[in-house]
């Protein structure tokens, strides 16, 4: 029987990191090129909720840019927000429009006005247990954006969330607070999932199957 991971999503995602690489640390030339490309497609998402007499609540997360200015992130990052701002690694700022969201899948689709090329979705039939994976994001508590690498441990890990039960990708790459909604990538830099949650020494990401179903439903 597969072990069920009990994961409770709070407004922000926290973990106790083993290690995550900062961008300014030395890497080999191939990896450095991958990082440079990936960071240009990864966005820092800031969701603001303004309420009379209660002030403004700010939630931070990460987003994965797709072609056409569309952005995938977690629904729990932008839930209830009255305005959303995204920032690029090179400090460009955009106001984002919420196109669609799905509470159960924990996905949201945003749109900004940019012609920057986004992540390409990988071929899910080529995913396998043991393949190298990497995640990228703008975690809380670090001045620089971070990168982490690891191995895909399960393609259909059964997880129980506050939104219900689902099957997610499980890896041993390190996920940090603020990485919610960020891209999970294969060794080619193709998108294989969207980071959703964490447990000790484990990361959990939304599958390509759920992403494609959500995108089909959300786009004209």
Image: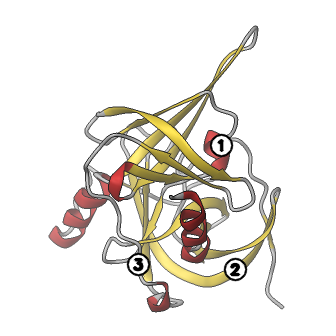
In what element is the residue under mark 3? loop
Numbered circle sitting on residue 122 = 3
Residues at marks 3 and 1, CA–CA distance in whole angstroms? 27 Å
Residue at coordinates 68% horizontally, 40% vertically from top-left? 79
Tell me where residue 116 appears, x and y as whole percent. Answer: 25, 51
Q: Which mark is residue 199?
A: none
Q: Secondary structure at mark 2?
A: strand
Mark 2 vs mark 3, CA separation in Å: 19 Å
Task: Give the CA separation, mark 2 to mark 1.
Answer: 22 Å
* Residue on which the image places disc 1: 12
Say whether residue 14 is visible. Answer: no
Residue 157: assigned label: 2
Which residue is the extreme one toward the left?
29
Q: Is residue 115 above or below residue 86?
A: below
- Of the residues tagged 2 and 3, which is closer to the observer? 3
In which quadrant is the N terminus drawn? Answer: bottom right
Q: Pick whichever, 29 or 166, lies toward us.
A: 166
Q: Answer whether labels 2 and 1 touch (C-beta < 8 Å).
A: no
């Amino acid at each position: 029987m597969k072990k069920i991971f009990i994961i409770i999503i709070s407004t922000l995602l926290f973990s106790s990191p083993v290690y995550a690489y900062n961008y300014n640390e030395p890497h080999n030339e191939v990896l450095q090129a991958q990082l440079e490309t990936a960071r240009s497609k990864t966005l820092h998402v800031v969701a603001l909720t303004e309420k009379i007499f209660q002030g403004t609540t700010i939630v931070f997360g990460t987003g994965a840019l797709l072609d056409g200015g569309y952005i995938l992130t977690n629904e729990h990052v932008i839930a209830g927000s009255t305005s959303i701002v995204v920032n690029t690694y090179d400090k460009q700022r955009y106001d984002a429009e919420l196109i669609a969201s799905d509470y159960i899948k924990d996905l949201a689709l945003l749109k900004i006005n940019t012609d920057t090329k986004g992540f390409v979705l990988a071929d899910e039939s080529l995913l396998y247990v043991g393949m190298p994976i990497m995640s990228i994001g703008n975690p809380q508590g670090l001045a620089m954006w971070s990168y982490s690498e690891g191995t895909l441990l399960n393609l259909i890990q059964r997880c129980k969330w506050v939104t219900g039960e689902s099957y997610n990708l499980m890896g041993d790459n390190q996920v940090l607070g603020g990485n919610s909604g960020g891209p999970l990538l294969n060794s080619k830099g193709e998108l294989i999932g969207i980071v959703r949650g964490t447990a000790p020494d484990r990361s959990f990401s939304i599958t390509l199957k759920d992403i494609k179903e959500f995108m089909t439903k959300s786009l004209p």
